């Protein structure tokens, strides 16, 4: 769990902060996140160059020499010598994954609710029992991130409630996130909030350590994320306009990269990689 910089050197205050955050999480979300030793959870270096390599199945490639942070799919190996973030699609099912139908979200007509942009069925996190059953699948993925040598976890689609036809609530999303935080922190992995600005006010109570953000420059949301996460933000932009916006205000402060929306590897016709410099 992140501790405010001014309190890091004061052990008593750090312990009190963690204790209070645990009470808040238990009261609000029903599960208290595991509190890792702050010295054991390492955050990405602020303002460092990074690369977003989450494409399946061949999204990983040798990063440029200036890159210090890389995010890769959980099925890829970490990049040697860099800060590695493990991408896990935690709230939706990949099109090629096989899930028990009872763990997929169904509408009133019995149809599976799908994120049509990516053809990904939504996972049904509406009850504690289903969240526990889904963690029986997703939890070992996080364990695998740790055993592979990743430094952090990026659980994607925290905002699946927005595509759920009103069937998933924000409380459901946060309750499941508390389970993901506990699992990551049990391995001393940092854990990121992926997008979902509306839930950022609860990030400390949940124990989220940093943010992975898509297009905060394009949607003029960077200042809002900074208000909640400080400089502990890695941002990917998919348009020249968004890249220019974020670079104008945050070059050297946040970690920023320009990528193509399909996050392809070099050699692809759509491959794009760019920096603020």
Image (cartoon, helix red, strand yellow):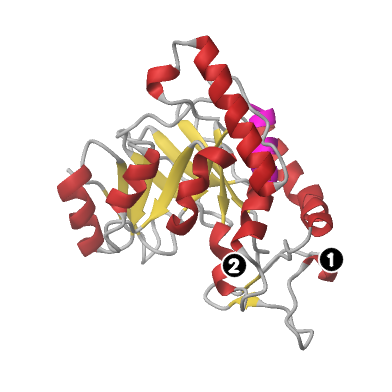
**x, y percentage for residue 206?**
58, 41
**x, y percentage for residue 5?**
39, 22
**x, y percentage for residue 27?**
67, 43
Left or right side of 249 for 77: right
Secondary structure of the residue carrying tag 1 is loop
What residue do we see at 34% from left, 32% from top? 46
Query: Is 95 placed above or below 177 here?
Result: below
What residue do we see at 68% from left, 64% from top? 93
Secondary structure of the residue carrying tag 2 is helix
**Of residues 60 and 252, the one drawn nearer to the viewer in this rendering:** 252
**Circle 2 Cα neighbour tier, 10 Å, few/some/many (<14 / 14–19 / ≥20):** many
Among the two numbered marks 1 and 2 on one chain, the one whose residue lies closer to the N terminus: 1
Query: Is 88 placed above or below 21 here?
Result: below
**Residue 161 badge:** 2
Look at the image and say whether residue 64 sits in the magenta stretch.
no
The range drawn in magenta is: 179-188
> Label 1 belongs to which residue?
100
The Cα atoms of the two marked residues, 1 and 2, are separated by 20 Å
Left or right side of 250 for 42: right
């Amino acid at each position: 769990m992140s501790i405010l910089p001014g309190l890091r050197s004061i052990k008593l205050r750090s312990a009190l902060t963690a204790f209070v955050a645990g009470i808040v999480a238990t009261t609000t979300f029903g599960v208290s996140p595991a509190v890792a030793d702050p010295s054991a959870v390492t955050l990405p270096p602020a303002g460092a160059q990074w690369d977003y390599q989450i494409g399946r199945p061949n999204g990983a490639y040798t990063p440029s020499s200036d890159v210090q942070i890389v995010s890769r799919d959980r099925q890829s190996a970490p990049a040697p010598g860099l800060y590695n973030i493990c991408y896990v699609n935690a709230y939706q099912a990949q099109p090629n994954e096989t899930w028990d139908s009872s763990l997929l979200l169904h509408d009133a007509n019995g149809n599976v609710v799908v994120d049509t942009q990516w053809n990904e069925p939504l996972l049904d996190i509406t009850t504690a029992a289903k969240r526990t059953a889904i963690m029986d699948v997703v939890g070992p993925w996080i364990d695998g991130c740790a055993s592979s040598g990743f430094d952090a976890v990026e659980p994607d689609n925290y905002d699946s409630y927005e595509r759920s036809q009103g069937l998933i609530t924000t409380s459901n999303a946060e309750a499941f996130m508390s389970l993901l935080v506990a699992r990551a922190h049990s391995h001393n992995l940092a854990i990121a909030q992926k997008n979902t600005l509306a839930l950022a006010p609860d990030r400390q109570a949940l124990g989220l350590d940093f943010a992975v953000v898509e297009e905060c420059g394009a949607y003029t949301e960077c200042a809002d994320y900074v208000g909640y996460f400080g400089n502990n933000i890695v941002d990917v932009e998919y348009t020249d306009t968004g890249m220019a916006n974020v670079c104008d205000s945050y070059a050297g402060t946040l970690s920023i990269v320009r990528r193509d929306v399909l996050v392809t590897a070099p050699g692809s016709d759509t491959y794009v990689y760019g920096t603020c410099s």
